[in-house]
Image: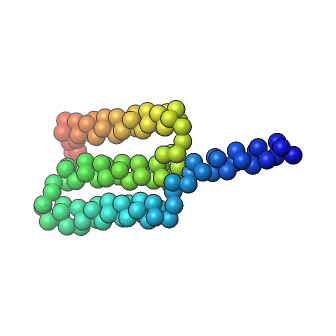
Amino acid sequence: MSELHTDHAHGEHAHGEHAGLDKKKIWQVFGILLAITVIEFIIALWAIPGKHMSQHVGNYVYIALTLMKAFYIVAYFMHLKYEKVGLQLCVSVVFIFILYFIVLMLIEGGYLHIHMPLV
């Protein structure tokens, strides 16, 4: 009987670690994600077509904003923020490699576009 009580208490402790994600925090993260999305739409529908921003700069801004949205989704809605540091580091290293490969592909794509034009 005491083992069940101990397991139940441990279960409450594990649930308590995730208690930081309440309704207020969910709405706050939703607001941040909405603001980032609105900024992306403004860039796509006003800044680039109106020549206030070049397409080249717009691409980098889109990537940065998308990575910010990915951080908030993974940290709060996938609960990575509440995991142990080892798992956070493991996922972060993979994320850094993905970011590196995105930059690498953008550089290579630009090189091929300049040096191998379509006929």
In the rendered image, the residue lying farthest to the right is 1
- Given residues 15 and 32, the one toward you in this image is 15
Side of 7 where 19 appears, left or right: left
- Given residues 19 and 77, the one toward you in this image is 19
In the rendered image, the residue lying farthest to the left is 51
In percent of width and height, residue 100 lies at 34, 34
In percent of width and height, residue 40 lies at 29, 61
Q: Residue at x 35, y 50 (%)?
A: 68
Among the 4 quarters of the image, the one containing residue 2: top right
In percent of width and height, residue 1 lies at 87, 46
Q: Residue at x 12, y 60 (%)?
A: 52
The C terminus - image quarter: top left
In percent of width and height, residue 75 lies at 46, 48
Residue 115 vertical position relative to residue 56 in the rendered view, above or below: above
Residue 35 vertical position relative to residue 118 in the rendered view, above or below: below
The answer to whether residue 112 of the structure is visible from this angle is no
Q: Residue at x 28, y 40 (%)?
A: 106
